[in-house]
Image (spheres, grey):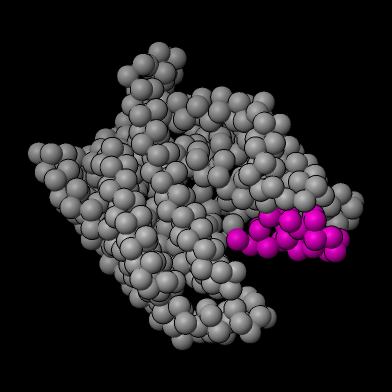
Amino acid sequence: MDQASTVSTSKAFEVTNRHILAIALPMTLAYLTTPLLGLVDTAVVGRFGDAALLGGLAAGAIVFDVVFTSFNFLRSGTTGLVAQAFGRGDALEERAVFWRAFAIAAVSGLVLVMLAPLIAAAGEWFMDAEPRVSQAMDAYIRIRLLSAPASLINYAVLGYFLGRGEAGRGLLLQLLLNGVNIVLSIWFGLHLGWGIEGVAWGTVCGEVVAVVIGLAVVVRRFRRLPRMSRQQAFNTAAMRRLLSLNGDIMIRSFVLMGAFTLFTRQGAQLGTLTLAANAVLMHFFMVTSYFLDGFATAAEQLAGRAVGARYKPAFTRAVLLTSVWGFVVAGVSSAAVMIFGDRIVAVLTTSGDVQAQAALYLPWAALTAVSGVLAFQMDGVFIGATWSRDMRNMMLLSFAIFVASLLLLGYYLGNHGLWAALHIFLIARGISLAAAMSRRVGRTFA
């Protein structure tokens, strides 16, 4: 019998540290493979000794960050709805949620493939780089966009597994995807001499292999369940709810990207040296976020399952334990950055001026983990509970506070003010979501 089918879906269930770590640790490892992949791609292209190719790869990666981050809702929205169906013990609805997400992913992916020339042109216009960089970027984007249907379907597959608390399967799929990607990028890029095109084709192959294996596992499981009509899978009300949920999450993601983009822009206004120092220091926050995302993912599944089961004790304990673990990890991360940060900065850049500038603002960067942990955990809770409208609204409120803080503090305190505004943004997100949660819990578990 499939292991997943033996998991208890009774309404009353206990949330333990073991449950949390069983989800958080595999997903943290999965998330940490992402920067490794970027390093390999850069190393492969860098072997050709052509700065234009490296510039094209970097610019193309930014375009894909924007495009695919916009579709992260396919993963998180699927996780929340599957977790709730799992909590109710409704296996047919779990399957229906997956096929709805699959349909949206497939259609969206095909649209992205057809829009590839337009997306490439828009990216080149926005970057406004020299012709050889734009040429390399164009080739990379056009090839990589061929993987869009597989990439977005992989989001749905991962969301389904995470919704059921099967983080181990999610980790294996991510390792398979990134492993194939790395091996083939090296093979195509270096051994066959395809360069940046080889790196792009390696990514396409990795996504396709992962989606074939992931779909095979999912379909094999579904065959053991009773037949489900197309009307049940794609009924209008359910599709409308999924699209509304996904729309709210998309807005939230866009605003979040906008906040970090604005932080970078304001730093650029203070000079190239400040821009470079901030870019180096933001790596500390990004790496820490991978660890915090692991516990936020645990909050998604367990909170969503508790909402589906209408079992408040499990919800309360899931919020408490994931937050405690989040603060522990954040505290350890901040301490590590404070102690070893200068040495890590020296590895990331050989410029003495950038190192000295980064040292001035290192404490700000080190403490972003502590300031942001509640925001990460509350995001996970709200996604799992599918309280997407509140999450969207609190993000918009926090962004308004951030903009006001950025302009005011940046004017009077320079780069110290920019970092202070970033902390205010993170804290505002966490506190506003926690306040909204206290109202939502009473209505949801009434």
As for residue 368 lying within the magenta part, the answer is: no
Magenta-tinted stretch: 35-58
Q: Is residue 155 above or below residue 235?
A: below
* Quarter placement of the C terminus: top left
Would residue 254 be visible to someone looking at this image? yes
The residue under the point 55% across, 84% down is 356
| Count of marks overlaid on the render | 0
- Quadrant of the rendered image containing residue 372: bottom left
- Quadrant of the rendered image containing residue 42: bottom right
Q: Position of residue 169 (x, y in %)?
A: 51, 48
Q: Position of residue 273 (x, y in %)?
A: 58, 73
Q: Nearer the viewer, residue 34 or 436?
A: 436
The residue under the point 34% across, 67% down is 409
The residue under the point 17% across, 43% down is 440
Instruction: Tell whether 215 sits left or right of 139.
Output: left
The residue under the point 44% across, 83% down is 338
Q: Nearer the viewer, residue 267 or 160?
A: 267
Q: Residue furthest front?
A: 411
Would residue 276 be visible to someone looking at this image? no
Q: Is residue 191 above or below residue 88?
A: below
Instruction: Tell whether 277 sits left or right of 377.
Output: right
- Quadrant of the rendered image containing residue 34: bottom right
As for residue 44 lying within the magenta part, the answer is: yes
Q: Position of residue 117 (x, y in %)?
A: 71, 31
Q: Is residue 359 above or below residue 100?
A: below
Overall secondary structure of the magenta section:
helix
Q: Position of residue 143 (x, y in %)?
A: 74, 39
